[in-house]
Image (tube, helix red, strand yellow):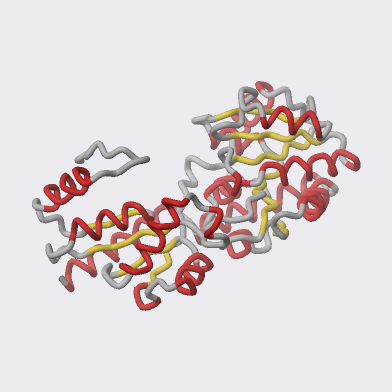
Amino acid sequence: MHHLGMHAAAPQLRDLWRLRILLATKPDVIHAWMYHANLMATLAEFGTGIPLLWGIRHSLYDLHREKRATRLVIRANRVLSAFPQQIIYNSSVSAAQHEAFGFQQARRLVIPNGFDTELFRVDCEARMRVRSELAIGDENLAIGLIARWHPVKDHANFLRAATLLLRSCPRAIFVLVGEGLVTENTQLPSLISTLGLNGRVRLCGRRMDIAAVDAALDVGSSSSWSESFPNAIGEAMACAVPCVATDVGDVREVISDTGIVVPPRDPEALCAGWARLATMEEIERRKLGLRARRRVIENYSLTAMASRYTDVYLNIIRKH
């Protein structure tokens, strides 16, 4: 392993030079991940003849909402997209969006995300422990959103839907987990108070025991207006938690018939999805969750994903 010590916020020419020196060791394959890395790797690889792969794990619903520097890098990726041997997306929707924007279609390869179904599983002990920690009773319906505080995750959509659901399901508790989801984030408590959700929302911040948190939920959720392939949904499903998620990226394909998919930026629709699961008998909701887990095991296992990446590397090395 080599760490180049690049500064994520402001890569510089010396960083490119460090990467170029590293490539002098003649690796078999260069695999960059995400736009900035794709750009840096392409510039560093120029003239070396080393096979180059790009990784894109992002969607392009609204380019103008990206940071200015990120927009420039994405446009640079578009110009350079003929250089990599393949562009590996984790979502078919993302691939189509990038190709419509001008990325090379002939380079497309889609490899969905994979999940560790031994780590993410049904765990009764973890469920009891986390629910006790968060003061969630057996009678409560715990609905969780695991996503960092960021505009694209649309926490406001989630919280507005929560206000609507409480009218018909007063036993609901809403669990928010992720970077920035803490009381010190002044925007969040203010929104929660304005919407009348005091005492109904658990702000957990960043946690390292996501599998245990998922096991404690009754319903998993995503309220984003843009995603490629949301890991949080796959992880919740692997824990046998049925999900209600917005129809972005490959969410509809991932969830299939194991949960509910609703339009983005529509709190009424998100609330209606939750309400459908809330009114189900507990045993039926558990059956739906177990079907979700089977879908992850059969279609999105970590082993299957790793095998596909290995095949890509070996095939490129053979051709090279």
Q: Which residue is outermost to the bottom?
A: 106
Query: Which is more toward the observer, 131 or 97?
Result: 97
Query: Which is more toward the observer, 183 or 214?
Result: 183
Residue 65: tell me if it is visible.
yes
Q: Is residue 159 left or right of residue 26?
A: right
Image quadrant for the N terminus? top left
Q: What residue is shown at x 19% (from left), y 43% (from top)?
A: 14
Count of all numbered marks drawn on residues in the image: 0
Query: Which is more toward the observer, 187 or 59?
Result: 187
Q: What residue is shown at x 22% (from left), y 44% (from top)?
A: 15
Q: Is residue 163 above or below residue 233?
A: above
x%, y% of residue 108?
Answer: 39, 72
Q: Is residue 101 above or below residue 126?
A: below
x%, y% of residue 137?
Answer: 77, 27
Picture quadrant where residue 314 is located: bottom left
Image quadrant for the C terminus? bottom left
x%, y% of residue 122?
Answer: 59, 40
Q: What residue is shown at x 59% (from left), y 52% (from top)?
A: 293
x%, y% of residue 31?
Answer: 27, 57
Residue 304: tell me if it is visible.
no
Picture quadrant where residue 215 is located: top right
Q: Is residue 78 above or below residue 178?
A: below
Q: What residue is shown at x 47% (from left), y 71% (from top)?
A: 101
Q: Is residue 12 left or right of residue 285?
A: left
